[in-house]
Image (cartoon, helix red, strand yellow):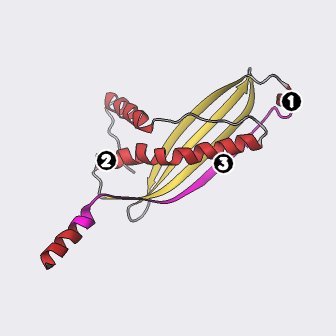
Amino acid sequence: MTDQQNTAANEEETAPQFSLQRIYVRDLSFEAPKSPAIFRQQWEPSVGLDLNTRQKALENDFHEVVLTLSVTVKNGEEVAFIAEVQQAGIFLIKNLDDASMSHTLGAFCPNILFPYAREALDSLVTRGSFPALMLAPVNFDALYAQELQRMQAAGETPTVQ
């Protein structure tokens, strides 16, 4: 019976573990350089979205992942507003091989953070008295796969920080 308990304990120690510890806004920014004149113009917006992720290893198998969404909305040639959010999370991730860890940090964690970042941006934009900004879902798995292909073509190897 003791051998079974030891085996179960050893399997539990080496089994992959993932746990979300905290989600928070790291940075939030909004600028409407043409206010209030922009509100008197016909509204025909064009939306530009940039997104980026970064991760940092913390102590004891904890990792911080930061998803940055930057939106620039132009009305004609004039910038109506620029909004940016850095949505971050702290994740406990243990016992993954390098490829799985890279995928988890590069795609799985940003998938978790995106709805929070999207809501923060939408709230920020509406507080600036602009129409709601409902960003479409992002396929981080596809973006991660594209980045891996780009790195392989360039002879680079993905690294986990």
Out of 153 and 21, give the one closest to the viewer.
Answer: 21
Magenta region includes residue 87: no
Label count reads 3
To which residue does mark 3 refer? 28
State if disc 1 and disc 2 touch (CB < 8 Å): no
Q: Secondary structure at mark 3?
A: strand
Q: Which residues are magenta?
A: 11-36
Task: Name which quarter of the figure residue 33 lies in.
Answer: top right
Could you tell me how far apart the alpha carbons at marks 2 and 3 are, in whole angstroms?
30 Å
Name the spot of residue 110 as percent of width and height, x first. Answer: 47, 45
Q: Secondary structure at mark 2?
A: helix
Name the spot of residue 133 as percent of width and height, x first. Answer: 66, 36
Query: In the visual, does 151 lie left or right of 35?
Result: left
Which label is found at residue 100?
A: 2
Q: Residue furthest top?
A: 76
Tag 3: Cα neighbours inside 10 Å, few (<14), some, or many (≥20)? Answer: some
Tag 2: Cα neighbours inside 10 Å, few (<14), some, or many (≥20)? Answer: few
Task: Name which quarter of the figure residue 36 lies in.
Answer: top right
To which residue does mark 1 refer? 37
Query: In the visual, does 68 lie left or right of 31?
Result: left
Q: What residue is shown at x 59% (from left), y 35% (from top)?
A: 135
Q: Secondary structure at mark 1?
A: helix
Name the spot of residue 101 as percent of width and height, x first. Answer: 34, 50
Name the spot of residue 105 as percent of width and height, x first. Answer: 41, 48
Name the amino acid, label 2.
Ser
